[in-house]
Amino acid sequence: MSTPLILLILAIIAVVCYVVGTRHALAIAGGLSSKLHSRPGYYGAFVAICAVLPAAVVLAAWLIASPFYINSTVRGGFPEDVKARSVAEQGLAFGMVSSLARGMDVLTLEEIDRVGSNPAELRNTLGTKGVALAGDPEPYMVASAGDLNAMNKISNRVMTAVVLIVALIGAGLSYNRISHRFRARNRVERVILGALVVASSIAIITTVGIVMSMLTEAGHFFGRVPAWEFFFGTVWDPRFAAAGTTASEGQFGLIPLLLGTLYIGLVAMLVAVPVGLFSAIYMSEYASPRLRSVAKPLLEVLAGIPTIVYGFFALTTVGPFLRDLSADINGIVTGNAMNFIQAQSVLTAGFVMGIMLIPYVSSLSDDIITAVPRALRDGSLGLGATKSETIKKVVMPAALPGVVGALLMTASRAIGETMIVVLAAGVAARMQLNPFEPMTTVTVKIVSQLTGDLEFTSPQTLVAFALGITLFVITLCLNIYALFIVRKYREQYE
């Protein structure tokens, strides 16, 4: 029985248990819910939870543990010469076995008997079923694939039986506990509270997991490349090495990438913040309701455009336009029609990224400014202040903490952008302050270092995790500084 079908059966059991538990509680109370400690629905919910929750836990544990046990057992049945191979070669062999198992699972008994132990015939037959194999399987692989299918089928049947039995036992025990004084509401609310705690902990656990994984791999990188060479190096030359080769490890200077990231992000913020903030002030304070209902959705359409589209826009329109414009200006001033703005440059990437970030600044700031109490505006206007003075002296200080948060989110979005930088700023790691020349960012190099035929344990690949943890620390510092600014201005305003 498949997992979705088991979940469907558990959902049906939960509904039945809820109805049966509710009716049983009312029957005990003689139809008067006032005689019960909790509302009848809580008793039904208690029975449903006791039936489904333990069964779901068993199902999840089985789905996690069973593949490990089955895979290790199948690997243990490999011939001794296969076990003596490297871990990578054993992984390739098990991958072939898994492909064979998936293919043999859809073959009929007649087809299995026909192909027998002929590897070429088996490969051709599986090809007609849409299962592609990298090569002809060896006899032990066919036998292991059969064992894998058999063990999976047995595990699935036992899992189904165990899950259903646990559900029925839970339903029966909880059904018998229903009485006048049974505190069903307390039990149900305790389970709901636990679910809320688990849900709220997911973000924290995920963040800790991401940081720990990056720290682990970054530690391996710094074990091979000194940290001071990475953080203070001014040359980025990783010298890519193909898998299995012994090429030089190269130079991994962070400074060019960090400078490019901050430079392009700064240009993007210079474009996005004034336009987005001023448009938010206009829509929240000056625009009529009819104009606001039309302008704000149109502005937020920009947030739904994929970043790759912005990248193509920068590559085919903005970049060539700025290049040709610089050539025309240079021709008028010096008589030499040579462009001084490259099609791929910091200016191109920052300008297009700023356009992309405008709806983030505008929408968030608009909601924050609109949330400022109307009484503050009326009090300022009643004291004789003009509308512009009210916005500058009252509304904006009140909305400042939220606006700072919006700008921080925008800065984080700018720092993490990749596709626009690849197409509009290039991939050259350079140290220069000319906004008309190409540069690159940390995120672009993270992608490039994890792409290609590289050993995952090589410095050329592990440096991506060092770059990732560096971005994390930068973002954390931005958050801490933003909190400091918010608290400072909030105290002054209060």
Image (spheres, helix red, strand yellow):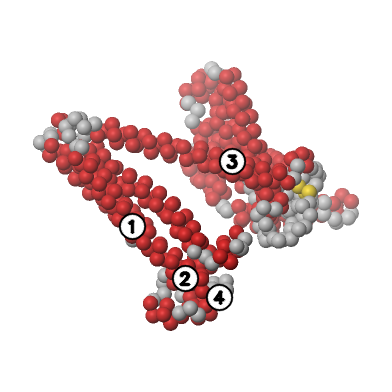
Instruction: Give the residue number, with chain letter if any, for mark 1.
Output: 158
Residue count near mark 1 (Cα–Cα under 10 Å), binned few <14, some 14–19, many ≥20: few
Kindly identify which numbered label has been placed on residue 211. Answer: 3
| Contact, mark 1 vs mark 4 (Cβ under 8 Å) | no
Nearest to the observer: residue 366 or residue 452: 452
Report if residue 256 is visible in the image.
Answer: no
Secondary structure under badge 1? Answer: helix
Seen in the picture, residue 200 relative to 51 is either above or below; the reply is above
212 to 394, vertically: above or below: below
Q: Judge by depth and name the residue closer to the eye, 135 or 463.
A: 135
Which amino acid type corresponds to the residue marked 4 in the rendered image? Asp
Name the residue that disc number 4 marks: 136
Q: Residue at x 57, y 19 (%)?
A: 491
Q: Quadrant of the N terminus?
A: bottom left
Residue at image position (55%, 42%) is 209
Q: Nearer the viewer, mark 4 or mark 2?
A: 2
Label placed on residue 143: 2
Callout 2 amino acid: Ala
